Amino acid sequence: MPNEFDTNMDNRLPRGGEEVPDAYDYGYSGNHSYHQQHPPPDGGSNGSSCAGDAVMIKIDVPSPVPSEPRFPKEVGKTCMALLMLGFNFILATVSLAMVHDRVPNRDTYGPLPDVVLDNIRPVEWALNVSEVLIMVMVNSCVLLITFHKHRFIVMRRVFLMMSLLYFMRSITMYVTVLPMSSTSYYCSPKSNATTPLEIVKRAFQLISGFGLSINGKHTYCGDYIYSGHTVTLVMGYLIIAEYSPKKFWIIHWLAWCASLTGVSMVLLAHGHYTVDVLIAYYVTTRLFWTYHTLANNSLLLKQNGHNYIGREWWFFIFRYFEKNVRGPVPLQYDCPFPIPWTKRALKLPNRDS
């Protein structure tokens, strides 16, 4: 004969063999069996169940309204990043102007042994091809960023990364000066006593030619470690691949081929040692990927004992510029000019489209 405890437990089970759900959803408004009325069983003298119907209480919580935009323009920060880029570009040209007089004499010290340069003959026109490809890549990036809806964020990132690369390059080229890698590249005469005025004149000449030798302004030597041509070409490809849709894979492949061809032309012209190119590729790609890993994961903005990327020397600069950007920048495009039929932005469904 079942005891009183077993009878009470049986009265608490749902009728009809229904199973009790693991999680009771208070926000569900459908006709779930547990949301329906269950009349109390005949209690009799046991009185194990409470009389009355089950009542579901639903509380409507309004969705939070964001007080700040998810992807703010922050034009002031973009201008600040541009100023940083200009300062570090000038710093790199001043470093080259000072290094020029320290380059070992080409008649006394020949090129260093290089596994690539030792096996190919220098082609003088190859450097011009490389710089033409640089101009194509730069203009393509400018066009892409101009029509990106979040152009100020993208510009700010590019300015900041390039300023960091120029800053590191100004240091590496100054601390170690290598002999000339080319036996035919023209270098301006050295000065016996380099004055500050002479350094300013050299820097102004380099800046007026945007650091390219195709216009005849880059006639100072010694900027080897690491290759500025490789930095620009690799950075151009990374920007196009990151901020354009994946369905434009043909453009990505063209950008990759242009970047690879430009770097190859630098080596074919003996404009840089192979180690210059390898270091430039490594530094540029690591900086770009590390920066975007941090920017796309807001949890990494915190500098604690478990976030070792936060120990990067430029992390505090990064956190200042990216602290208000929440998540990956969507691939959306619009026209920056006030044209009536381009008011609606072209919005792609996701970054993998």
Image: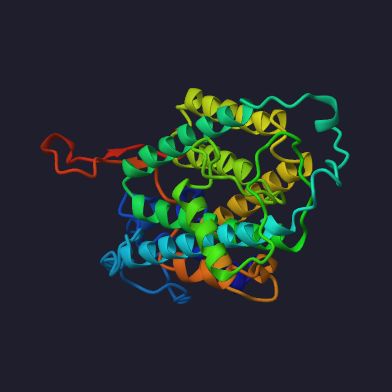
Q: Could one spot residue 13 in this view of the protein?
A: no
Q: Is residue 270 above or below residue 316?
A: above
**Residue 151 point in image, percent of width and height:** 35, 50
Residue at horizontal 53 percent and vertical 25 percent from the top: 254
**Which quadrant would the C terminus be assigned to in this image?**
top left
Above/below status of 349 relative to 20: above
From the viewer's perspective, tell me whether residue 113 is left or right of residue 161.
Answer: right
Whether residue 190 is visible: yes
Q: Residue at x 26, y 41 (%)?
A: 334
As drawn, 111 above or below 7: above
Which residue in the rendered view is the most extreme toward the front?
192
Q: Position of residue 103 (x, y in %)?
A: 75, 54
Q: As drawn, is 147 to the left or to the right of 338?
A: right
Q: Position of residue 281 (x, y in %)?
A: 68, 44
The color scheme shown is: rainbow
Question: Is 252 rendered above or below residue 28?
Answer: above
Which residue appears at 49% of the width and 37% of the height?
215
The quadrant of the rendering that contains the N terminus is: bottom right
